[in-house]
Amino acid sequence: MNSKMLKKVFTVVCIISLVGSLAGCGKATKTTTDTEKTSSTEAKSTVEDSSSETKKEVTVTALLQQSRNYPGLQKMIDKLKADENIIVDLQIVPDDQYNNLLQMQINSGEAPDLIDYNLPAIYGLIDPETYLADLSDEAWVENLVNPSIVTHKDGKVYGFPFQASSGVSGIVYNKQVFEDNDIAIPTTEEEFNAVCDTLLAKGITPLLLPSDNWVPQIWMSIGEGLAAGSVEKAREIADALLTHKKEFTDYPELIKVVDTYLGMFDKGYFNQDYLTVSYDACLERLAKGEGAMLFGSAGILSAVEGAFPDAKVSLFNPPFDYNTNDALVSGLFSIGFCASKNSPKLDTVKRIFDLWSTPEYMNMWFEGNAGFPSFPDVDGGDMNDDVVALYNEYSAEGKIVGEMNNYLNDIQPLYKTTLWVYYLDAPSKGITGEELLATFQKDVNEYMKEKQVEGF
Amino acid sequence: MKKCKVSSVIKYIILLILAFVYLVPVIMMLLGSVKDPAQALQFDLSWPKAFHFENYQYVIENGNILRGYLNSATITFSATALTIIFGAFAGIIISRRSDKTGTALYYYFIFGLTMTLQTASTFALLKVLNLYGSRFAVISIYIGMRMPFTIMSFSSFIKGIPREIDEAAMIDGCKPFGMITQVLMPILKPITVANIVITAISCWNDFMIPLFYLGSGKKWTVTLAVYNFFGMFSRNWNYVFAVLTLTVLPIVIMFLFLQKYIVSGMTAGAIKG
Amino acid sequence: MHSKSDKKRYPIYFVIPAFIFYSIFIILPFGISFIMSFTDWNIERMYIPIFRGFDNYIAIFRNSVFIRSIFNTLLFAVATTILKTLFGLLLALALVKVSRLNNILRTIYYIPCALSPMIIGVIFTSILANDGLLNNVLSTLGFSAVAVNWLASYGTAMSSVILIEGWMWSGFNMFIFIAGIQAISKDYYESADIEGAPAWAQFKSITMPLLIPSFTIIITLNITGSLKVFDLIYVLTKGGPGFDTQVLSTFVYKAFGLGLLGQSSAASIVLSALVVCISFVLNRYLTKREVEL
């Protein structure tokens, strides 16, 4: 009896799973060519459902980093579906797996239609001429506030940016804490140290640092930009490094930037638990005044204000000695999307970019995420007055420089895997700036050799 | 006698405390899933100030959880069923055949216990086979991965079952297929259930293989749905906890129903030769 | 004669489905990796690898992080295997009798291995944080001196990962041991009782020897499993602080992330070779002991 029943169950399971897997197989072998067919049949059924619907349903695939899944973007995608019957099939990928997955898909010819990445950083990760669609002739390109941000070396545009610049970067601080303790914004390194000592004495953590490895590197990326002092000089340094005419350790100014950062640990200015505390927790500490300062971009201001409406935060230019030219760093990159060159839906993707470039769509992106929009008539949200003033002041003097990472694009994949880890690891092991950069240079040499770059 | 009782009370007190410690992470997750965002962020065992069961509603509506469930269920069910069928047949045959082929096959399959997922090679292979982006690819990889353990456990369990049973079945006129499905499989029920549980858990919880080989977000499993709720600038831990709870719920329920078979199933290992 | 009827009764074609899936999706990729480990396979040149001999192997063995990974992998495997085996055995001995309470307790001890590594990562990083649950409890109990930042230094980070692995899998071992103990005939214990042998002596001379087969299974599974550990390290420490808790699997993944597929393959071949050697030696030793008994 029992065994008979078991037998029946067994047979049923057999049949179901075999059929299931065969069906899966049939679908599988044709996925690439079949998508259009399925989407058209889906379209038919929606047409039947609502006779008013006239536009044919199209689905495009998109690869998106987890941290870029902003509510604003989601609204833009929803609107596409409602107004245009364009469905964006999102694959939301954990940030630390993103590079691997993207490279794998692109190099094997399985690229998604839409690719999220920082522009122009993506040009260093994958070869735009081979894999990305040339968007130079799109109508919106003419309206870009800052076309240089998406223009590749060959003069062509391979990406759609949301921002004209990622914004001014520097030291984000809690205004309330500064006011309560009668602290003025420091203008020299000496003054900066004095401010930190005052804060320490009051039991406030002067500088906040989370364990997320993308954060400490901001110190160096901004610092090295300031140390270079001008766009020309920064380009010159990057050029020499990427062709191996020079090494990192040949530049005392770069070593000094790392040493300044490491020196903050020796003086005890950072929070003790920097090896484990999360970025979110640091923002909270900053907002609540448990910590006073955090290195980063102006984007942090809106993030803090969004989560903690009572917090008073602002930003000042780092007054360190290495900033000899008194420059200001503004990230010469933007969050954006690229289109895959061989995408069968390229027309739809281009139409999406067209739509997104209008204020109707792009305003959504900046809601609760204020910044510098890439198009003139888009509302970028409420920017912090100090930041705008700072930007205008330095831009009038022509003293704005990009982050060093912008110029060192080609070795970008190494940052996450080694360099950033070194930055977080060095303080507790007593490694100096020069040793750190020497170790990293070895990684660079090996990596560039594997990539068969001349000079390595 | 009295001494014995006291020691057994002490034993159970220790075991109960230990059980509590064991469950702390689970309790934290469950409580966190019904807290408000601020309280959830404290990561403690405090009782929720108010029960926000709507967290679950929000997560289900916004996280593609149901789609994820369907995908996970399809993949897990197919992979588990086929793993058990293929593994049981192979395990039985390999163990029963006392010739060189049997032994060679046994070691060939056991070798798989030493291997890790070859991410890039598998990717290249799926591309060549034109299977990339299909559920079938993911199911097949799971089947392949589970073979060593499944075959090992079935072949050691079957050693504890006398060959006379097989012979009797053949004399009764069974074909080999009938002998296995009608006579042996019922006897092998405990190890079958144990294997179902272990295989289903490992397929359901895995996230690397679907992430790398499924392609379209429409096919994503519920384990990957969690990423909808992580963001660098906005982490709503109450939602994260709710999603986490939802992802493990089906598998834990399945385990609770089947767990009584596991002990008898594992006797397999003990008999092993 | 016997084997002839064997062949008929146990036809080899029943093994074919298992053979095909396993060979295509596990062995073949492994074979590809093995061949590619001798080439300059790079993510940007996926389809045009060039032979370069043992260069990849030489490169990884010159890499101090790789050597450290080997050490960590071995440490993790040995420590967790001992921990899980002993703890699993203790739990099994305590819960071997069938009763309602015992059944509930067994389930509780087994539940951690049904949780996905991702969940474990999320929950334990918050428990072990500087201001996390563990340190809060410790300072409430007056032990604030021992409250440290658990995942921030090599010693505590590695110990935490090892303990968490133990937490996850001891219940699984417990089940195998319970099954093993239940399979031991009651007669042995009855006659020992008559002879008046104390409980400890019974355990030493009856339970332990007869459990050797269970030990073989558990140790083999645990060693092979923990040498390949990836998920847990990845979600808890990401190989950090620095590269301190990097193991072989995470090293493989890191090389993969840089697009150095040849090197990544070489590292994974080394890992497999290590697992093969260790489990072969162990299996030899353990089965020899079984035979001796």
Image (tube, coloured by chain):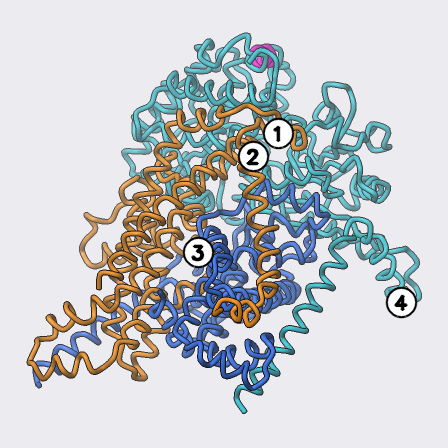
Chain colours: A cyan, B blue, C orange
* Residue C182 sits above or below residue C291 on the image: below
**Amino acid on which disc 2 is placed:** Ile
Indicate the amino acid at tag 1. Answer: Val
Residue at the spot x=50%, y=78% of the render? B184
Question: What secondary structure predominates along the stretch shown in magenta?
Answer: helix
Tell me which chain the residue with mark 3 is part of.
Answer: B
Distance between the alpha carbons at the discs numbered 1 and 4: 48 Å
Q: Are marks 2 and 1 in contact (CB under 8 Å)?
A: no
Q: Which mark is residue B41?
A: 3
| Letter of the chain that mark 2 sits on in the rendering | C
Of tags 1 and 3, the one toward the viewer is 3
A162 to the left or right of A68: right
Tell which subunit mark 4 falls on.
A
Residue A50 numbered tag: 4
Identify the residue at the far bottom of this view: A1
Residue on which disc 2 sits: C35
Instruction: Pick the residue in front: A226 or B151.
Output: B151
Q: Which residues are magenta?
A: A234-240
> In which quadrant is the N terminus of chain B drawn?
bottom left
Q: Assess whether mark 4 and mark 1 are in contact (beta carbons under 8 angstroms).
A: no
Residue marked by disc 1: A388
